[in-house]
Image (cartoon, rainbow, N blue to C red):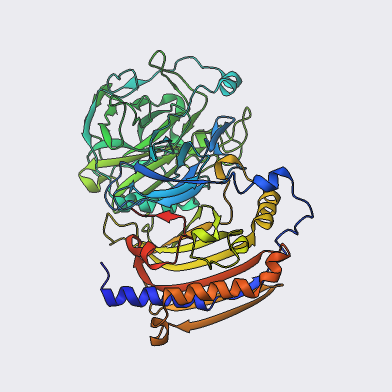
């Protein structure tokens, strides 16, 4: 808890901010109001409602791994030529960040029309899509298994004949090997570093593509475990070994061994492959024709990915749609042939694969991010395979997330109004666009959702006729039918705010005015009721604008020392913020 005197200082300084509000008439970006009201305009506000929804969202991640996500009213993903992509014309209802345990257990104010909810995340190590339905004010979520029966894509290529391969053992109906030997632990620092180095749908950096085979420096045993699978396909992961320069190796002569017949993490069913479950690779001895536990010094290990090569119906492996190697020259493209990245973080070695062509082949083309399949390679001794592998940077530093939530309500819901002239006051509505700045430290309590270090409010006050017109002029769909709120979250490793600062800013006909002040003793003397009175005086001073069906705009910006998220609602003159903490 904050000390009582600190809490009073913060609360009073925030209310002092309201006294400094600069109010302007409607800006040019607000549409002019028409002379007549349609039925839709008369009822637009009445049809807009809100519902508090408790989110029970939990990702299975290591402690300290905070997952960013977006919430939609419909499935935001679709397939285009075998590639899973986000719909370009769909905006999230809001976005959020979990606490350090991968949990999001907060109540949020959502549009009244919302029922089905889809949670998307591009983060490594978590399912890309979760689904939940609001029931009795609560939404529980489970993973959505993306369909891999893309009939259009299968018709383009068909299935190839089986190819010769060696295997390490058998597998069950879901393609999980029966030769898993151990479970590898993955730290949150590893996952955060990978997220920063390999963002979704962006081509992987060239420094991680220079060398993609594993070189064994000393006799060693080798294990491979799945770290992430973000593909629409049921890919097959194989490997081969060689000595010397791979340029001298004939691809037809290699002995391909299947590591994972279905290299897909399955969370919905207990019998499916889980992240971190490792298989021990075997060395094919060309002299004896036997599989051995130890890879000899001087051996290199290459990788083979057969795109959608596993058939769930009959548990068989085929050549798949494409065959991609870690050695680029064996791949089918005419230009960029690289499909693999190799990197490490604190001797944690990772290989990533792109499972679609880098150029359009048979109408299919990938995005080059090399995170369709990511797996961890470990060895005993531990330093046997880390030679000449590039290191990725720490997953720290400032990042930004954008949160879209909407709020519109009667002014009477925000503050107590004068009893005189009720027809005027009760007809006033307020639409808000809020920007909250978060600070989340890597060292912060795992149960914490971070601290608030800044707030911006853009408010529009208007009568019902004017607000109706603004809503109609800016149509929205049923899943996101509330307007004018946008929240930005900034996550940084450490808090660096040295002083409290308050900014009051407004734009009038393109001119911007800013006032800056430090919080002082005068600011601490301001009380909430005085702030309310000041807001009402501002509205009264511009009543002629409101009566003329013109909206008025209030814009406020401020920065302050970090306020724990759990106490933010008590300190801010809400309910402009769309967040509810219970």
- The answer, for residue 521, to whether it is visible in the render is yes
Q: Nearer the viewer, residue 560 or 128?
A: 560
Count of numbered circles on the image: 0
Q: Where residue 246 sits: x, y (%)?
A: 42, 37
Determine the image quadrant of residue 306: top left
> Could you say which quadrant of the image residue 254 lies in?
top left
Query: 149 or 524: which is nearer to us?
Result: 524
Residue at (38%, 68%) from the top-left corner?
A: 571
Residue at the far bottom: name it.
521
Which is nearer the eye, 323 or 520? 520
Direction from residue 577 to residue 140 in the image, left or right: left
Left or right placement of residue 387 versus residue 359 in this view: left
For the question of whether residue 298 can be seen, the reply is no
Q: Going by the picture, which residue comes out furthest to the right?
A: 35
Q: Position of residue 354 (x, y in %)?
A: 48, 38
Expressed as whole percent of the image width and height from the top left, the position of residue 178 reads 25, 22
Q: Is residue 34 above or below residue 366?
A: below
Residue 415 or 520: which is nearer the viewer? 415
The percent coordinates of residue 481 (x first, y second) are 58, 46
Residue 479 higher or lower than 539, as above or below: above
Locate the N terminus and report the quarter of the image it occupies: bottom left
Query: Residue farthest to the front?
Result: 420
């Amino acid at each position: 808890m904050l000390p009582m005197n600190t809490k009073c200082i913060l609360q009073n300084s925030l209310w002092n901010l309201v006294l400094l509000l600069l109010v302007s008439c409607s800006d040019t970006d607000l549409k002019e109001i028409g002379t007549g009201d349609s039925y839709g305009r008369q009822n637009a506000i009445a049809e807009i409602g809100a519902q508090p929804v408790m989110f029970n969202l939990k990702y299975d991640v290591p402690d300290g791994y905070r997952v960013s996500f977006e919430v939609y009213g419909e499935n935001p993903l679709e397939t285009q030529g075998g590639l899973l992509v986000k719909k370009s014309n769909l905006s999230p209802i809001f976005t959020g960040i979990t606490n350090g345990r991968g949990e999001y257990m907060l109540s949020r104010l959502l549009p009244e029309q919302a029922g089905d909810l889809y949670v998307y995340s591009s983060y490594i190590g978590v399912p890309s899509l979760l689904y939940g339905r609001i029931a009795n004010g609560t939404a529980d979520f489970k993973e959505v298994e993306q369909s891999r029966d893309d009939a259009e894509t299968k018709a383009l290529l068909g299935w190839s004949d089986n190819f010769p391969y060696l295997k390490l053992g058998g597998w069950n109906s879901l393609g999980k090997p029966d030769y898993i030997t151990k479970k590898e632990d993955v730290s949150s620092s590893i996952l955060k570093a990978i997220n920063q180095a390999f963002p979704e749908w962006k081509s992987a950096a060239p420094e991680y593509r220079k060398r993609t085979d594993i070189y064994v420096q000393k006799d060693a045993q080798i294990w491979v475990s799945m770290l992430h699978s973000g593909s629409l396909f049921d890919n097959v992961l194989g490997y081969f070994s060689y000595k010397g320069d791979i340029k001298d190796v004939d691809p037809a002569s290699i002995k391909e061994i299947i590591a994972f017949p279905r290299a897909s993490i399955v969370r919905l069913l207990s019998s499916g492959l889980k992240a971190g479950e490792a298989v021990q690779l075997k060395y094919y001895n060309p002299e004896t024709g036997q599989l051995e536990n130890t890879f000899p010094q001087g051996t290199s290990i290459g990788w083979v990915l057969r795109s959608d090569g596993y058939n769930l119906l009959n548990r068989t492996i085929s050549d798949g749609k494409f065959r991609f190697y870690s050695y680029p020259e064996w791949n089918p493209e005419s230009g960029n042939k690289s499909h693999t990245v190799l990197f490490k973080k604190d001797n944690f070695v990772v290989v990533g694969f792109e499972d679609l062509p880098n150029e359009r082949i048979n109408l299919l083309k990938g995005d080059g991010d090399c995170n369709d399949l990511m797996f961890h390679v470990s060895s005993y001794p531990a330093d046997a395979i880390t030679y000449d592998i590039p290191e990725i940077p720490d997953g720290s530093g400032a990042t930004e997330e954008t949160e879209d939530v909407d709020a519109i309500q009667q002014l009477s819901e925000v503050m107590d109004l004068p009893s005189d002239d009720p027809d005027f006051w009760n007809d006033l509505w307020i639409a808000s666009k809020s920007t909250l700045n978060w600070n989340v430290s890597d060292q912060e309590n795992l149960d914490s959702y971070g601290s608030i270090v800044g707030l911006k409010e853009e408010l529009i006050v208007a009568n019902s006729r004017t607000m109706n017109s603004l809503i109609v002029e800016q149509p929205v769909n049923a899943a996101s039918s509330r307007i004018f709120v946008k929240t930005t979250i900034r996550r940084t490793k450490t808090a660096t705010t040295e002083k409290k600062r308050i900014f009051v800013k407004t734009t009038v006909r393109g001119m911007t005015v800013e006032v800056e002040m430090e919080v002082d003793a005068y600011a601490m003397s301001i009380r909430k009721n005085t702030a309310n009175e000041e807001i009402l005086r501002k509205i009264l001073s511009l009543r002629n604008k409101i009566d003329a069906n013109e909206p008025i705009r209030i814009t406020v910006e401020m920065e302050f020392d970090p306020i724990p998220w759990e106490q933010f609602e008590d300190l801010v003159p809400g309910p402009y913020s769309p967040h509810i903490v219970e």
